[in-house]
């Protein structure tokens, strides 16, 4: 099963207010485990970057001015995600920005049904607890000391580890091992049931054995098990 852990950084909070993407990244998972394949695109937002946004991700207009616009990377991005399920922390936010960019290009939007929202997973698993990425890293003992600023690729890598824990950590593999053991036992039982029963082996003593037994008893003084 192929999934893409996805994250974005933006110039602000609302694409309807003219805010744009400045970074998109994705990490590939197969059966919930990172494959080592990842992609990141820095994007020229074609507008200024407010100071409050720079304080979050550290990306400046000077840094991004020579990066491609989203239209130039859209096909590469869509090819990378393919038809994979998208794993996103607060999926509504990222999809809102991605779909606004795709709409500008006349491309189909990404439906919310394609996304697994790890915020919703975390709230269901830990009701009432904090569910920020930093809080979840702390809960699961995932080292995020190097996360001094938000960065799409770094956040994807951390979220991939958090997602595995939200799915049960290494327990799914343990469950599969138990299932395999149970299946093996069931197969052995079926095999045993299918075998033709063996005829019982005779255990009656032979004449020689009876004579030897009597000779042994004759050497004993008044044995209590001797037939009277």
Image (cartoon, rainbow, N blue to C red):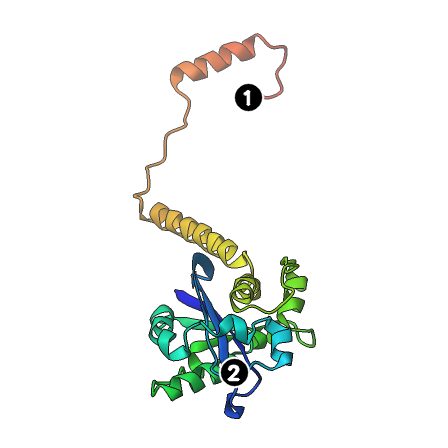
Is 37 left, or right, of 64 in this rendering?
left
- Label 1 crowd bin: few (<14), some (14–19), many (20+), radius 10 Å: few
Is 61 left, or right, of 138 in this rendering?
left
State whether residue 72 is above or below residue 175.
below
Is 131 left, or right, of 70 in this rendering?
right
Label 2, on which residue? 92
Residue found 56% across the figure and 72% down from its top:
59
- The C terminus appears in which quarter of the rendering? top right
Q: Position of residue 128 (x, y in %)?
A: 70, 77
State whether residue 105 is above or below residue 80.
below
Residue found 43% across the figure and 52% down from its top:
180
Query: Where is residue 161, by image quadrant?
Result: bottom right
Give whichever of 10, 166 is nearer the camera.
10
Sooner in the amino-acid sequence: mark 2 or mark 1: 2
State whether residue 214 is above or below residue 79.
above
Give whichever of 1, 144 is nearer the camera.
144
Q: Position of residue 144 (x, y in %)?
A: 63, 60
- Label 2 crowd bin: few (<14), some (14–19), many (20+), radius 10 Å: few
What's the mark number on residue 227? 1
Q: Secondary structure at mark 2?
A: helix
Q: Position of residue 121 (x, y in %)?
A: 56, 74
Residues at circles 2 and 1 in contact by the CB criterion of under 8 Å: no
């Amino acid at each position: 099963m192929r999934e893409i852990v996805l994250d974005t950084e933006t110039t602000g909070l609302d694409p309807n207010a003219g805010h744009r993407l400045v970074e998109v990244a994705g990490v590939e998972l197969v059966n919930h485990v990172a494959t080592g394949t990842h992609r990141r695109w820095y994007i020229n937002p074609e507008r200024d970057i407010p100071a409050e946004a720079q304080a979050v991700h550290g990306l400046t207009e000077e840094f991004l001015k020579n990066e491609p616009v989203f239209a130039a990377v859209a096909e590469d991005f869509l090819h990378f995600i393919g038809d994979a399920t998208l794993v996103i922390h607060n999926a509504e936010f990222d999809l809102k920005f991605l779909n606004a960019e795709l709409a500008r290009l006349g491309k189909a939007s990404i439906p919310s049904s394609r996304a697994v929202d790890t915020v919703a997973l975390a709230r269901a698993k830990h009701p009432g607890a904090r569910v920020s990425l930093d809080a979840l890293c702390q809960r699961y003992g995932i080292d995020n000391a190097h996360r001094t600023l938000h960065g799409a690729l770094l956040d994807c890598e951390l979220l991939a580890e958090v997602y595995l824990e939200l799915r049960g950590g290494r327990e799914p593999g343990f469950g599969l091992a138990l299932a395999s053991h149970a299946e093996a036992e069931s197969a052995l039982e079926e095999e045993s049931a299918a075998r033709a029963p063996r005829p019982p082996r005779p255990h009656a003593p032979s004449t020689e054995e009876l004579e030897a037994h009597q000779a042994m008893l004759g050497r004993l003084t008044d044995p209590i098990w001797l037939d009277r």
